[in-house]
Image (spheres, rainbow, N blue to C red):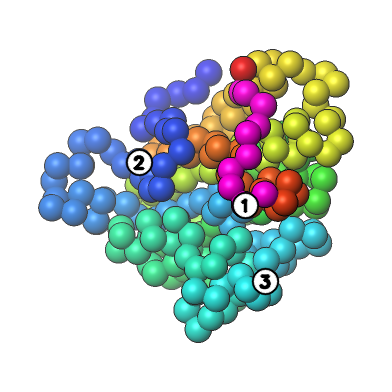
């Protein structure tokens, strides 16, 4: 059973941040000075380049990706410019952009203000990430545990625990589970689940994941809902269409 924390589940929106409710009214910019760091876990929507450092076919470290980013660099973000989590970090006043945790030259300051563990093509269903060699959500949780160990060795356990308890955790995953593992190649999950049953399977995986995060000290957690499947670039590309494509109903 999930213990108490500041937890919210949102439909698809552009910006998510969850902070302690008793601190919202304390400042003109409510999020400023109340969030110690931002940690991000999920899929390509929030991967700032972790896939650059693993053996996967899901990479975007080449043009035209990044053409609207600083210095026109393709950083491994699955977008032309910045990610929503980059804007979020900037709005909070922590940093201009979220770095990938697997970057081998991260500074202590970068570690202390937050990193992203997200991996393009990942999902709550382990089969989703395995298809292309992405980092599963379970592995991302293990990376966060490794992060804690690194930080404890640098600033001590007490300061690390305090930092994590005041940090905001953003989770964005689940879309690939349906688009890849259920509705598409090679219809692996449809052999065993109806859509409603697969939803319940994913919800159980999400609950386990959240409990794992909370066991590590996370208290302020935001989850982004799945986006309209037919509007995803990969779906439009495969179908060779120019507009959003109708997809099977969720239930």
176 over 108 or under it: above or below: above
56 sits to left or right of 75: right
Q: Earlier in the sequence, mark 1 or mark 3?
A: 3
| Numbered disc 2: secondary structure | loop
Left or right: 230 in relation to 170: right
The span picked out in magenta is: 241-250
> Between marks 1 and 2, how big is the CA–CA gap?
35 Å
Residue at 76 percent of width and 62 percent of height: 54
Report which residue position mark 2 lands on.
18
Q: Position of residue 39 (x, y in %)?
A: 48, 52
Which callout, 1 or 3, points to the residue nearer the camera?
1
Instruction: Give the percent coordinates (x, y) of residue 20.
Output: 28, 38
Residue 114 horizontal/vertical position (percent): 46, 59
Query: Which residue is the site of mark 1?
Result: 242
Q: Residues within 10 Å of mark 3 (few under 14, many from 20)?
A: some
Residue 61: mark:
3
Residue drawn at x 80%, y 51% is 132
- The residue closer to the viewer here, 231 or 49, is 231
- Could you tell me if residue 203 is visible in this image? yes
Circle 1 crowding by C-alpha within 10 Å: few under 14, some 14–19, many from 20:
few
**Which image quadrant is residue 7 in?**
top left
User: Which secondary structure is most common in the magenta stretch?
Assistant: loop
- Badge 2: few (under 14), some or many (20 or more) residues near its Cα, within 10 Å? many
Asked if disc 1 and disc 2 are in contact, CB closer than 8 Å, the reply is no
């Amino acid at each position: 059973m999930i213990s108490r924390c500041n937890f919210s589940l949102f439909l698809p929106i552009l910006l998510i941040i969850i902070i302690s409710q008793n601190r919202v009214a304390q400042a003109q910019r409510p999020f400023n000075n109340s969030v110690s760091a931002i940690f991000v876990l999920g899929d390509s929507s929030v991967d700032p380049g972790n896939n650059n450092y693993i053996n996967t076919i899901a990479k975007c470290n080449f043009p035209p990706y990044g053409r609207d980013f600083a210095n026109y660099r393709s950083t491994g973000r699955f977008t032309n410019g910045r990610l929503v989590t980059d804007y979020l970090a900037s709005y909070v006043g922590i940093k201009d952009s979220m770095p990938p945790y697997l970057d081998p030259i991260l500074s202590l300051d970068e570690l202390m203000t937050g990193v992203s563990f997200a991996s393009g093509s990942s999902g709550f269903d382990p089969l989703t990430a395995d298809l292309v060699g992405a980092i599963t959500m379970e592995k991302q949780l293990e990376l966060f545990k490794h992060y804690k160990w690194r930080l404890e060795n640098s600033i001590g356990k007490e300061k690390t625990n305090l930092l994590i308890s005041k940090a905001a955790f953003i989770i964005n995953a689940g879309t690939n589970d349906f688009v890849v593992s259920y509705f598409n190649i090679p219809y692996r999950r449809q052999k065993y689940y109806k859509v409603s049953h697969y939803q319940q399977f994913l919800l159980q995986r999400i609950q386990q994941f959240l409990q794992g995060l909370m066991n590590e000290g996370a208290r302020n957690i935001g989850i982004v809902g799945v986006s309209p499947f037919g509007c995803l670039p990969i779906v439009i590309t495969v179908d060779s269409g120019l507009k959003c494509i109708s997809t099977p109903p969720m239930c």
